[in-house]
């Protein structure tokens, strides 16, 4: 079936990025030839196994340095080998490695796929080892870019292609659908069908108004849009959530000095046996640690205690803390339960720009009656003892819940593709315009303009929308024509 | 004995007439060959021009310097602006025409053009040398030479008429078919197909009882098609509406077994949007009734066209069924309806100029390209005529884009997507329909028509004046202030909210419930200002002010996509080496050979990623 002019335009939108990237061509070529890249090739999250893919000229030496078993550089292409991945003498995991030598690989480069056990810890650890040995993390779609373009094209073009391939081409259409997990695409497709039906009712009014045709009920249209938005908006929110999963949640642990921040930090990190990587702050002195809870990466940021001070150096620290808190996605505000000053906290809270959790530490220092009293008076406050490991699990649950405030349930769809996200946003914007048009009783042709806009963005996600779709729908459902 | 022509046009229907007129007006020596000089510009189907989307096309043809609008204005018996209750992009002019006067005016217009010669005979073949057409050969064996040839054969190529179980060769009832051309073109490598269309019976108006029908009058203030100073209607004839019913359907069903369509004798594909009445009751069995438009065929004739009753059932069944229609109890039939099958050439074999890819200097226009409708034919004829002239005189191609005109949409659809059923224009086919309005076809196109020597100086002056006056008027509305105490009483009377402080007049015009007419009544000062402008200018300004945001939104889209329309693909680009694109994409691209990336993206079967890959390779 013929493709529409709407899908073209959307396609063109994605292509607009292409034209702009010409300047960095030579630089990219250089990178392309030199780099060895790696990434988790299986879906993120807990699975039985995880596959890490490494591709590029240094693939074999890099993996060989962390792999204990046969000398991989001496093995034939298309063979599989058992062995262990080691960090110096420490065994990280038992793995199977699959070898693909250039050009007989997906990327046409030397490629190794490491199948390891599917825990975040192991995967992260192996990736870090590979990175340490000289590879770099692949950009989204970069394997496909390499496979496709073989180093001849500039970065922006390659990325545009990778994105298109990932979602638009016939062969990888399924990939795109898979990316949008959990029946979301099916649901979108159904709603899109309903919207197409509506669009054709409106087109019917417009193109065949002279004939004996029924009128499209505007209230039904309004209801339909609400229904579509009920699906769209959580998806749009989920992208932000997806981003959080990908990039981590900057989480600031703030509080007055001696509230027990460091103790809590260590407790959280130790408890989780998380990978503690000291990322040297580039422009800031604040230390970041990473903590995984239920697959969500929290970037814990330790801060200088908050208090009014005359000490210049400490003042700088406090200033920095406040800046950090401004950038944070989540704030854990810790205070010493034994010297609680609620007015001060209340004042502090009003300055937070991010969701926060109020945590009263050192409950072990309170008497049972004091504790019961506090809990009854301040139900919103979480009472813990970092040093005695009390309620730390509850805090972790709370952290996770805060991130998932958009009510995304486990196993729900998460939109991770930026292009999909943008189309979802555009769709929603167009639907808002339709609603506005309905409020102002604009004529069908103008409603149609915005509906078409919405359809074309939805179509970009689920497949394609064509004007022929509309006409075909009209011809099959309505008796028109003199 | 016979001189050499610049352009030969074969066929004198809507496409042929526009083609001949355009090429001749631009300065080419034109020979118009028709099988029957008495049926030049014959309206084979209903006696009407325009309609939704089609009316916009007539306005575009007129704006470019074509004749369909002028001829329609001179010969119409009723005018209506359809879709008035909708946005301005939907307003669609439509007229009922005097069938005989229409044909007469066209012939006279062509006769007045000294560059047009006529020849009455059947063309039996083309003269082709080195993949280039150099003339035509007729049935008598005469060879006419020309630099370019336009084929507008309509339904005549191996035309086969069906009525019930009878069928006979012909291009219209009582007119012979044309043979030879299809066979030769196929031999030259063209792909040919079959299409089908139909027409309803014509009846005697004296035998109808109009008291049983609803009257459909023309507009109170009838407008017209041409941007030139053509006459407006002072009196009009009405159409009448009636309906079929169960009795009519039952009678029709008795003829189903003899229906050439249901029995499979008709191989060609008919249009879904113009179904025969038997098709309607068969496919939409739950519908109790279907609308019938009873249309007079002219000022003086009693012949009446039964629009909505297209049929190829046996004539006795047609007659019996007609009698069951309210108002038709005593009907006398003049001619039965019929279906006709004819050859067409899938239009993906054409360039944007409507020149064939296979044979240089050969152009196709109208039903030969798989379209239906007078307006669709006329605009293709115009474009083919223009380009046949340009080619004959070694001048550059003349094409219109999808954002410029419905004509651009039509041709782009045809050459890139092809068509499986007779192609008719709908507004929904145009992605930029808010821009492609009937009120601004002159603003969009007249300058372009003038630049190639088709649209007259008078047309250009008119449009320049219209543009300048509109700008002036809008500027005035932006500077005219109005105070609450002057207008609040009137605003409340209109039913729109009162002003709290002074404002510019233009802001009032933006309100949905205030139009130019109401604006005039607000203050004597406003009225005095507006009275300096013609109605056409007032309308143009009103549309531009009221619908500014919608118009801008589409313009933004056009601009965004424009760069892809300008990205040219090398003529000899080798698609076989594009390993990364889909098989289907590669085949389609090799076949269509798009001129630009924009065009490539519209070809069916070419995926967005194919297009991206294409761009990357081109860049290399």
Image (cartoon, coloured by chain):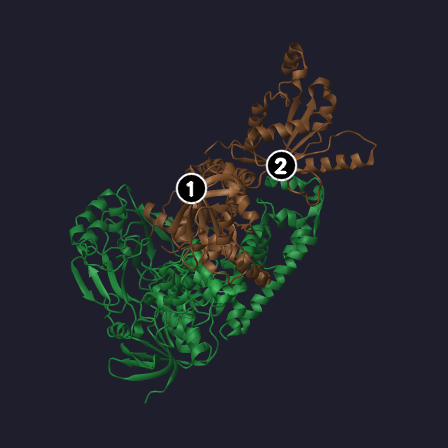
Chain colours: A brown, B green
Decide: few, some or many residues near mark 2? Use Cα within 10 Å; few <14, some 14-19, many ≥20: many
Between residues A120 and A223, which one lies in front from this camera angle? A120
Are discs 1 and 2 less than 8 Å apart at CB? no
Mark 2 lies on residue:
A289
Identify the residue shown where x is 42% and y is 37%: A48
- Judged left or right of residue A179, residue B2 is left
Between residues A449 and A215, which one lies in front from this camera angle? A449
Identify the residue shown where x is 60% and y is 66%: B465
Label 1 and label 2: CA atoms lie apart by: 36 Å
Q: Chain of mark 2?
A: A
Give the quarter of the image for residue A332.
top right
Task: Let me know if marks 1 and 2 both belong to one chain.
Answer: yes
Residue A185 — which label?
A: 1
Mark 1 lies on a secondary structure that is helix
x then y, percent, for residue A243: 55, 41
Label 1 vs label 2, nearer the camera: 2
Between residues B532 and A29, which one lies in front from this camera angle? A29
- Judged left or right of residue B347, residue B479 is right
**Which mark is first along the chain, 2 or 1?**
1
Decide: few, some or many residues near mark 1? Use Cα within 10 Å; few <14, some 14-19, many ≥20: many
Q: Is residue B469 above or below residue A266?
A: below
Q: Work out which quarter of the rendered image holds the N terminus of chain B and state it.
A: bottom left
x then y, percent, for residue A205: 42, 47
Q: Residue furthest bottom?
A: B1
x then y, percent, for residue A163: 49, 52
Q: Residue furthest right?
A: A310
């Amino acid at each position: 079936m013929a493709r529409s002019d709407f899908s073209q335009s959307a396609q063109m939108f994605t292509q607009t990025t292409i034209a702009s990237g010409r300047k960095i061509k030579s630089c990219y070529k250089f990178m392309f030839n030199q780099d060895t890249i790696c990434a988790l090739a299986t879906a993120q999250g807990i699975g039985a196994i995880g596959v890490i893919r490494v591709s590029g000229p240094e693939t074999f030496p890099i993996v060989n340095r962390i792999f204990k078993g046969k000398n991989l550089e001496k093995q034939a292409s298309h063979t599989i080998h058992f062995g262990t991945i080691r960090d110096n003498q420490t065994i990280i995991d038992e793995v199977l490695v699959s070898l693909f030598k250039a050009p007989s690989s997906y990327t046409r480069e030397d490629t190794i796929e490491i199948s390891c056990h599917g825990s975040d810890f192991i995967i992260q650890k192996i990736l870090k080892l590979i990175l340490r040995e000289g590879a770099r993390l692949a950009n989204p779609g970069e394997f496909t870019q390499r496979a496709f373009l073989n180093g001849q094209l500039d970065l922006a073009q390659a990325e545009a292609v990778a994105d298109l391939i990932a979602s638009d081409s016939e062969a990888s259409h399924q990939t795109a659908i898979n990316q949008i997990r959990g029946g979301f695409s099916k649901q979108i497709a159904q709603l899109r069908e309903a919207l197409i039906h509506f669009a054709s009712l409106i087109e019917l009014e417009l193109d065949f108004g002279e004939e004996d045709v029924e009128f499209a009920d505007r209230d039904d249209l309004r209801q339909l849009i609400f229904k579509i938005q009920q699906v769209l908006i959580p998806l749009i929110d989920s992208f932000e959530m997806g981003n959080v999963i990908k990039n981590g949640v900057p989480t600031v642990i703030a509080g007055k000095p001696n509230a027990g921040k460091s103790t809590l930090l260590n407790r959280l990190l130790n408890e989780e046996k998380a990978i503690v990587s000291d990322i040297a702050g580039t422009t800031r002195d604040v230390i970041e640690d990473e903590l995984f809870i239920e697959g969500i990466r929290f970037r814990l940021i330790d801060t200088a205690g908050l208090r009014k001070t005359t000490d210049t150096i400490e003042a700088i620290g406090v200033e920095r803390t406040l800046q950090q808190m401004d950038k944070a996605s989540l704030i854990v505000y810790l205070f010493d339960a034994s010297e609680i000053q609620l007015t001060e906290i209340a004042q502090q809270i009003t300055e937070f720009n991010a969701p926060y959790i109020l945590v009263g530490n050192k409950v072990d220092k309170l008497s049972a009656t004091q504790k019961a009293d506090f809990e009854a008076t301040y139900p919103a406050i979480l009472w813990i003892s970092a040093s005695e490991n009390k309620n730390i699990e509850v805090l972790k649950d709370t952290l996770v819940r805060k991130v998932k405030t958009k009510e995304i349930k486990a196993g729900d769809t998460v939109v991770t593709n930026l292009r999909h996200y943008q189309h979802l946003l555009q769709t929603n914007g167009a639907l808002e315009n339709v609603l506005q048009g309905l409020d102002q009783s604009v004529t069908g042709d103008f409603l149609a303009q915005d509906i078409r806009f919405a359809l074309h963005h939805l179509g970009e996600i689920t497949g394609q929308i064509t004007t022929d779709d509309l006409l075909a729908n009209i011809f099959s459902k309505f008796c028109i024509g003199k | 004995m016979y001189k050499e022509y610049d352009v030969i046009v074969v066929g004198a229907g809507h496409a042929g007439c526009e083609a001949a007129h355009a090429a001749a007006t631009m300065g080419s020596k034109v020979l118009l060959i028709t099988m029957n000089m008495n049926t030049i510009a014959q309206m084979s189907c209903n006696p009407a021009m325009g309609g939704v989307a089609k009316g916009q096309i007539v306005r575009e043809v007129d704006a470019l310097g074509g004749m369909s609008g002028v001829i329609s204005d001179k010969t119409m018996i009723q005018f209506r602006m359809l879709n008035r209750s909708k946005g301005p992009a939907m307003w669609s002019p439509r007229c009922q025409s005097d069938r005989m006067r229409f044909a007469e005016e066209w012939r006279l217009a062509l006769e007045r053009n000294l560059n047009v010669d006529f020849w009455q005979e059947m063309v039996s073949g083309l003269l082709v040398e080195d993949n280039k057409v150099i003339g035509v050969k007729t049935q008598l064996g005469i060879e006419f030479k020309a630099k370019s040839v336009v084929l507008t054969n309509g339904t005549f190529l191996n035309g086969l008429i069906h009525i019930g179980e009878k069928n006979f060769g012909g291009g219209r009832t009582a007119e012979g078919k044309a043979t030879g051309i299809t066979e030769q073109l196929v031999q030259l490598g063209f792909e040919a197909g079959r299409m089908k269309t139909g027409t309803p019976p014509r009846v005697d108006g004296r035998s109808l009882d109009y008291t049983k029908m609803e009257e459909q009058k023309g507009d109170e203030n009838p407008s017209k098609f041409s941007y030139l100073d053509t006459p407006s209607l002072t009196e009009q004839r009405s159409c009448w509406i009636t309906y079929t019913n169960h009795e009519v359907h039952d009678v029709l069903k008795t003829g189903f077994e003899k229906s050439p369509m249901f029995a499979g004798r008709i191989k060609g594909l008919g249009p879904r949007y113009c179904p025969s009445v038997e098709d309607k009751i068969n496919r939409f069995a739950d519908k109790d009734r279907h609308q019938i438009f009873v249309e007079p065929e002219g000022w003086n004739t009693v012949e009446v066209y039964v629009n909505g009753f297209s049929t190829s059932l046996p004539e006795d069944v047609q007659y019996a069924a007609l009698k069951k229609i309210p108002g038709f109890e005593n009907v006398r039939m003049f001619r039965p309806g019929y279906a006709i099958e004819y050859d067409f050439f899938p239009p993906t074999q054409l360039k944007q100029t409507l020149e064939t890819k296979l044979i240089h200097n050969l152009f196709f226009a109208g039903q030969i390209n798989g379209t239906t409708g007078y307006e669709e034919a006329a605009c293709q004829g115009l474009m083919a005529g223009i380009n046949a002239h340009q080619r004959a005189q070694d001048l550059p191609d003349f094409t219109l884009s999808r954002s410029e005109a419905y004509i651009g949409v039509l041709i782009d659809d045809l050459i890139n997507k092809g068509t499986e059923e007779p192609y008719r224009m709908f507004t929904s086919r145009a992605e930029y329909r808010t821009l492609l309005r009937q009120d601004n076809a002159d603003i969009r196109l007249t300058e372009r028509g003038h630049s190639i020597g088709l649209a007259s100086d008078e047309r250009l002056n008119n449009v320049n004046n219209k543009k300048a006056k509109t700008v002036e008027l809008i500027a005035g509305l932006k500077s005219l202030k109005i105070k609450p105490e002057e207008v609040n009483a009137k605003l409340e009377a209109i039913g729109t909210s009162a002003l709290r402080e002074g404002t510019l007049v233009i802001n009032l015009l933006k309100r949905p419930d205030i139009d130019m007419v109401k604006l005039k009544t607000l203050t004597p000062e406003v009225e005095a200002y507006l009275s300096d402008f013609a109605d056409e200018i007032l309308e143009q300004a009103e549309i531009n002010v009221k619908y500014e945001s919608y118009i801008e939104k589409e313009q933004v889209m056009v601009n965004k996509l424009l760069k892809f329309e300008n990205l040219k693909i090398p003529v000899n680009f080798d698609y076989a080496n594009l390993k990364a694109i889909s098989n289907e994409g590669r085949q389609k691209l090799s076949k269509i050979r798009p001129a630009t990336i924009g065009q490539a993206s519209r070809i069916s079967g070419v995926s967005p990623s194919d297009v991206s890959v294409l761009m990357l390779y081109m860049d290399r």
